Amino acid sequence: MSERKNRGSIFLIAAGAVFVCAVIGILAARSRMRESRTVSMPLPYVSEAYLQTSKGRVTAYQNKDPFSKDLCVSEDNTGLEGLSITEGESGALFSLDDRTVLFSRNMYGKIYPASVTKIMTAILVLRHGNLDDSVQVTEEDLMLEEGSQVVGLAPGDTVTVRELLHGLLIHSGNDAAMVLARHVGGSVPHFVEMMNETLKELGATGSHFSNPSGLHDSSHYTTVYDIYLMLNEALKMQEFVRIIKMSAYAMTVTHADGNREVINLSSTDRYLTGTAQSPRDVIILGGKTGTTSMAGHCLALASQNAFGQKYISIIVGARNSDLLYGDMNKLLAQINE
């Protein structure tokens, strides 16, 4: 009996030893696999990265160009000696040639964009619309809150996408925004979905839009930096650049009775109409204004200095138009320094 117990004990000890050795072998194999495995996880903001293995070996590998390689990137608040803007405003100054942020205040904080939104509306129209299409205005297109900025469309009017785009960007017509959104998106809700998808594509992660015009809604918001991303993208489009330079435009509309009318539109940008003067040797290329009671007075602007270098400057949340253009001039005065 005693011999049988001893043989059983020896068998159990041997089996346990075999099990322990097998486990050690499996762990060692896994470790070797980890060390030899090729790393493929993308790192969006770097072009080269390094992996240190468990044995201390350092391996470098190349990645695709970083998402931000052609963008201005900086901290939320970047000071510039002698420069300040009015308390309560947010703003920034971007050097497109140097890809630097020269000044910023609350650049990543949530703000309301008002009609600066129409930059994104224009991007989608130029990407997905046909400028020569004719569109008939419906009553639903004109269901806007009282006092909305409009170009003066009426139900039954027929107007081309090209003409509507001028009304959108020059005179900031909310009626033009609604007609364009319905036509290009198939419906306004679908167009808004397209807006939010494009925001993600541009990296505008601090934004969410709920309409194509910028009329106030608590779920319609952005940041100063995201406005820069939108305007920077729009400036790549020749038709956008051509339109935003205009101080006025004669828009042709065909009414339901067949009669044609020319509607004279003036720019909402005081630099373009001559009621505000930019600093010496600064060329205003154009941009987009916006005003609501919640957003305040806003302006996103493209400009050029005496040496041909291009800039984007943004002021949002100004209490009135005089403060808006006064603080914008403070930013513009820096680009020839």
Image (cartoon, rainbow, N blue to C red):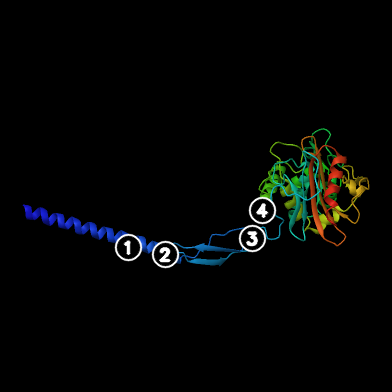
Q: Position of residue 19 (x, y in %)?
A: 26, 58
Amino acid type, callout 2: Met
Mark 4 is surrounded, within 10 Å at the Cα level, by few (under 14), some (14 to 19) or many (20 or more) other residues, namely few
The image quarter in which residue 148 lies:
top right
Front one among 83 and 45: 83
Earlier sequence position, callout 3 versus callout 4 = 3
Marker disc for residue 25: 1
Amino acid type, callout 4: Glu
Looking at this view, name the residue that lies furthest to the left: 1
Marker disc for residue 66: 3
Earlier sequence position, callout 2 versus callout 3 = 2
Question: How far apart, in angstroms, are the residues tagged by discs 3 and 4?
Answer: 14 Å
Earlier sequence position, callout 2 versus callout 1 = 1
Question: How far apart, in angstroms, are the residues tagged by discs 2 and 3?
Answer: 29 Å
In this rendering, the label closer to the viewer, 4 or 1: 1
Q: How many marks?
A: 4
Q: Name the quarter where the C terminus is drawn.
A: bottom right
Earlier sequence position, callout 3 versus callout 1 = 1
In the picture of the structure, the residue carrying the numbered disc 4 is 201
In the picture of the structure, the residue carrying the numbered disc 2 is 33
Res 233 visible? no
Question: How far apart, in angstroms, are the residues tagged by discs 3 and 1?
Answer: 40 Å
In this rendering, the label closer to the viewer, 2 or 4: 2
Question: How far apart, in angstroms, are the residues tagged by discs 4 and 1?
Answer: 47 Å
Tags 2 and 3 in contact by the CB under 8 Å rule?
no
Q: Position of residue 294 (x, y in %)?
A: 77, 35
Mark 2 is surrounded, within 10 Å at the Cα level, by few (under 14), some (14 to 19) or many (20 or more) other residues, namely few
Amino acid type, callout 1: Gly
Q: Position of residue 182 (x, y in %)?
A: 75, 45
What residue is drawn where x is 7% and y is 53%? 2
Q: Helix or strand or loop: what does disc 2 sit on?
A: helix
